[in-house]
Amino acid sequence: MPADIRQVGFDWAVTLIVGGPDAHLVVRIEEPLLLVSGGVEHRLDPEGDPAALAPALGLVRGTGTELHALGSGQLEIRTGDGTSGGCGTTRRRWNCSGRAPPACRWRSATGRRASR
């Protein structure tokens, strides 16, 4: 069974909970991010107007989730339906915690699977 994005939350960040039957990973993004869905680009700022974050709700139930943490401080997100997103600057304002579900492809900056 693929890992699903089970929940998307908003406060002063965008929080994704990626879960499978055995584990979940919490991804908290506290900086502007770019989300591309259906060929449309959405620039989302968690510190801006909360209504403008609505495109992130389209990530809920996204399957086949891939997360890539790059050495430059960037985070890339891809789902099985072709939706992609990313954020990251030299001042990293995102973090991941928890245990990645086996079906979620989570790669660290070294290219190795980070947690399982």
Image (cartoon, rainbow, N blue to C red):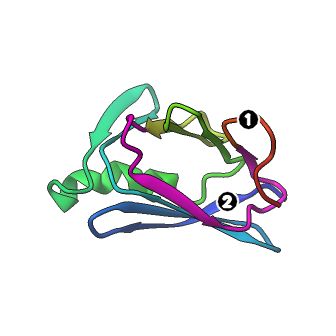
Q: Quadrant of residue 42?
A: top left
Quadrant location of the C terminus in the rendered image? bottom right
Alpha-carbon distance for marks 1 and 2?
Answer: 24 Å
Question: Where does label 2 land, which residue?
Answer: 4
What residue type is disc 2 on?
Asp
What residue type is disc 1 on?
Thr
Q: Is residue 105 left or right of residue 49?
A: right
Query: Which residue sits furthest left?
Result: 49
Q: Nearer the viewer, mark 1 or mark 2?
A: 1
Q: Is residue 62 left or right of residue 95?
A: right
Question: Where does label 1 land, which residue?
Answer: 110
Sequence-first disc among 1 and 2: 2
Name the residue nearer the viewer: 10 or 52: 10
Q: Residue at x 16, y 54 (%)?
A: 48
The magenta segment is 88-107
- Label at residue 90: none
Q: Is residue 45 left or right of residue 115?
A: left
> Residue 115 appears at what percent x and percent y?
78, 58
For the stretch drawn in magenta, the main secondary structure is loop
